[in-house]
Image: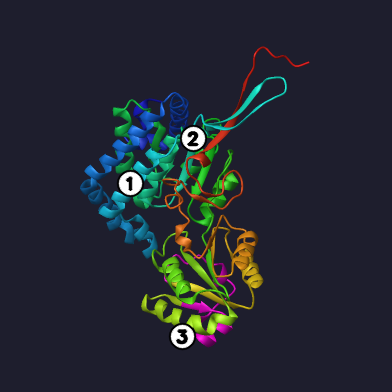
Amino acid sequence: MGRDLAGEAGTMTADDILNLEAYCVDVARRAADAARRLGDVRSGIKDRWLVESAAALRDQTAHLLTVNARDLAAAPGSGLTEAQVDRLRLTEARIADMARGLEAIAALPDPIGATVSATVRPNGLHVAKVRVPLGTVFFVYESRPNVTVDAAAICLKSGNAVILRGGKEARHSSDALVTLLRSTAARLELPEDAVQLVATTDRAAVGHFLRLSQYINVAIPRGGTSLIQRVAREATMPVIKHYDGNCHVYVDAAAELSMAITILINAKCQRMGVCNACESLLVHERVAGDYLPVLAAELRRRGVEIRGDAATCRLVPDAQPATEEDFRTEYLGPCISVCVVPSLEAAIDHINRYGSHHTDAIVTRDLVAARRFAAAVDSAAVMINASTRFHDGGEFGLGAEIGISTDKFHARGPCGLEELTSYKYVVYGEGQVRS
């Protein structure tokens, strides 16, 4: 099929849609070819692409806001929640953040070709472990335009081509952003097909891509549980999964309560519709009487509903009784589950039972308790006296992320440049043969 099949950033004709499988094969084949060509691209060219793309974002801010307004106008008809609309929305500040993120990635070392380790064997062989790209990434994600840019940036910088299948609610915004990124790539003679947006919203396309392991090296789903389960079930290539963010804050008996108020309010309320927002609060019974009434007043002022266990409901009269399901729920909105616990160990058990292995925090002045919490809580990130909202690629110094993996293989936590690489062994000899 011809190169015009996918159009600029992915426009399809009616005939193309009728031949959906052929379209998906064509996109994947061109991505794999682009990935091979990226192997010869110098770091400086990739960094120029990032910096010039950042400048283009700033220059086209007005246009991007106009395009995004089309998606926002259609949001009510798509049945999006308030949190989902917030994730869909672009603002001047968010576009500026996207541009700064590209520049931050440009400033990071290129992982490709870096030596992870090296040894010299007794026979004189030099054995080096060297970073290489994964190849082609198929990325399925929710309606968040900033994620389109972040994913493209870290994939290309780490030598990978990416096929972007964003949520249909952001299709105008994503199309404009990918057009911008591809245009910048073309000016620098980078392979444009290293960044492709799937042109159709037909969910059947996802299934076609997941069968193309001869072209696609890894699938990364980021969104609802049903999407991730589908991708994990159907994929014929490895999958890096990003499950729910049922994040906890535990206020220990040795907590500084004013700090615990500040951290919880930030973790829950700074931005409610994101995966690293706090959804569950645990409070040691020794400080619950002093802490919870004050906290409840702060949450009430911000419109957050408390769903608590019996002890919480006694201390906070307007709290609603929590169900078993409440303790498992990622609300992504103005609701939080609260439980009073008798000990640090009870808090750890609660988190490991109900949590999603994403991000959990302890507030305490007891270093022994902090170390025990960090060792025993089975999550991708553990925060000690800090908000869960810091679990983010940019905040961790990775520039950006393609997602936060709750897996343990092949990556865990924010997936940045290094997490999108593998390695190979390069062995230098001087004529040695094995006896």
Q: Is residue 399 above or below residue 79?
A: above
Viewer-nearest residue: 223 or 423 = 423
Q: How is the image coloured?
A: rainbow
Check residue 111 in the rendering and tell me which mark sits there, or answer none.
Answer: 2
Residue 378 seen in this snapshot: yes
- Please give the residue where the numbered disc 1 appears in the rendered image: 100
- Decide: few, some or many residues near mark 2? Use Cα within 10 Å; few <14, some 14-19, many ≥20: many
The residue most toward the right is 435
Q: What residue type is labelled 2?
A: Pro
Q: Residues within 10 Å of mark 1 (few under 14, many from 20)?
A: many
Query: Looking at the image, is mark 3 or mark 1 earlier in the sequence?
Result: 1
* Residue 318 numbered mark, or none: 3
Q: Could you tell me if the residues under marks 3 and 2 are in contact, i.e. CB atoms within 8 Å?
A: no
* Element at label 3: loop
Q: Which amino acid does label 3 sit on?
A: Asp
Residue 221 point in image, percent of width and height: 50, 48
- Residue type, label 1: Arg
State which mark lies toward you, 3 or 1: 1
Residue plotted at (40% across, 50% down):
167
Q: How far apart are marks 3 and 1 (CA)?
A: 43 Å
Q: First in sequence: mark 3 or mark 2?
A: 2
